[in-house]
Image (cartoon, coloured by chain):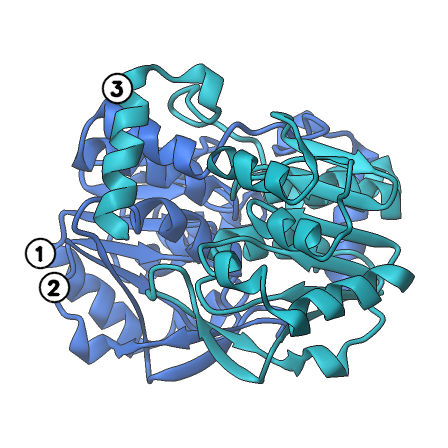
Chain colours: A blue, B cyan
């Protein structure tokens, strides 16, 4: 089973690495990190280099397509190479998936027209602009397309996907292998769970980094 | 604030990338991926290449030390270069942290003698061998040393750490930025939560990959 994870300049690392860490443990899984050209791409803040091992032209019919997000998606919604690759890979994929603002690329490729989909909470208006119907759900599955909300949601998405590819016991085994027994110190991981002071701090932190 | 994440051959990617994705958003954070030599290292299964940007010799006094785990730690418990680096960096660090079997390296460096610590559930006996007192907790803090359990626990650990470095509002903002509102499909992320069939599948999957 070939799993293609697209990576690009200014990708958000956890969007890609969260699901990868689940899916790479599936029996027979071969994970390929694909991109425009082989070699290093840097994450959104530039702090981490990830290696593209295969070009889009080399991985044309993966079983699973995974599109992570990141600030880099804002340029890629106009990039014919990645959008064509997504459209063609989707024709034969078993599942086509995204994490965070990766769904903007699925939408820009025309895959989400009139369909329910999710993304990072800050990007819902953009998803709407591309003709999708944004929801506040953490995971949205419409046929073989699965979109996940912001960054860390890719882990949950990958566990759902793994169960559809195998069985409940295997999905639970994968969850145990990564000891995914979440214990966040606060219940602050969704927009409707925080107060205005937290939102203000998000804006300050985002400005600090851009 | 300098955050040094040690990476090495056969590192588990999510151990490093989970906490990185939280901590890189801290005000003033500079994250350095450090290793024996600059250039690419491959994750435990070989599927992903991560870039070492700085050698251990170039990052001698980071504020935060983060040691991820992975099958590669089994060789490194005998590697004087990384163990010396951990010992020296720990002398001046604000916090010295590990995820998963990264705690085996803290222990091999002599930092955990007689101290409570945690690791991946499968590695508790090894942690005991190095003189630490393994627990089943997800996060263990002893003074300025924080150890986290398997793989995904690094995200929880980083949120705890972020709060100690800043304040509750900032930690909640970081949690929201990565939309960490976990919704795993099953409650199977800890050893005591699964039945024997899941454990058997873990063994089969691990064998399949080794």
Identify which residue, B154 or A56, lies in the foreground.
B154
Q: Circle 3 sits in a helix, a strand or a loop, which is it?
A: helix
Residue A92 — which label? 1
Q: Is residue B181 above or below residue B70?
A: above
Q: Is residue A66 above or below residue B155?
A: below
Residue bearing mark 2: A61
Identify which residue, A169 or B120, lies in the foreground.
B120
Q: Does residue B24 appear to the left or right of B151 in the view shown?
A: right
Residue bearing mark 3: B197
Q: Circle 1 sits in a helix, a strand or a loop, which is it?
A: helix
* Mark 1 touches mark 2? (CB < 8 Å): yes
Chain containing mark 3: B
Q: Position of residue A55 (x, y in %)?
A: 26, 79
Identify which residue, B157 or A200, lies in the foreground.
B157
Q: CA distance from mark 3 to mark 1?
A: 34 Å
Q: Circle 2 sits in a helix, a strand or a loop, which is it?
A: loop
Foreground mark, 2 or 3? Answer: 3
Which residue is rendered at x = 41% and y = 56% of the image?
A102
Looking at marks 1 and 2 on the same chain, the residue that comes earlier in the sequence is marked by: 2
Q: CA distance from mark 2 to mark 3?
A: 34 Å
Q: Does residue B23 appear to the left or right of B92 in the view shown?
A: left
Which residue is rendered at x = 49% and y = 66% of the image?
A11
Residue A67 — which label? none
- Residues tagged by mark 2 and mark 3 found on one chain of the structure: no
Which residue is rendered at x = 78% and y = 50% of the image?
B111
Which residue is rendered at x = 11% and y = 64% of the image?
A61
Mark 2 neighbour density, 10 Å: few (under 14) some (14–19) many (20 or more): some
């Amino acid at each position: 089973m070939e799993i293609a994870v697209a990576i690009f300049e200014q990708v958000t690392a956890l969007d890609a690495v969260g699901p990868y860490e689940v899916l790479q443990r599936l029996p027979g899984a071969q994970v390929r990190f694909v991109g425009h050209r082989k070699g290093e791409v840097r994450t959104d803040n530039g702090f981490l280099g990830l290696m593209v091992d295969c070009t889009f032209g080399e991985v044309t019919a993966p079983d699973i397509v995974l599109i992570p997000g990141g600030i880099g998606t804002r340029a890629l919604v106009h990039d014919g190479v990645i959008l064509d690759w997504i459209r063609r890979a989707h024709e034969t994929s078993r599942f086509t998936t995204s994490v965070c603002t990766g769904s903007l690329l699925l939408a820009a490729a025309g895959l989400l027209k009139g369909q329910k989909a999710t993304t990072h909470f800050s990007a819902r208006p953009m998803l709407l602009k591309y003709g999708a119907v944004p929801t506040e759900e953490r995971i949205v599955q419409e046929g073989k397309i699965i979109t996940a909300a912001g960054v860390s949601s890719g882990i949950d998405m990958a566990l759902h996907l793994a169960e559809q590819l195998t069985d409940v016991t295997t999905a639970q085994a994968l969850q145990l292998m990564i000891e995914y027994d979440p214990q966040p110190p606060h219940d602050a991981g969704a927009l409707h769970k925080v107060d205005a002071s937290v939102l203000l701090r998000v804006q300050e932190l985002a400005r600090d980094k851009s």
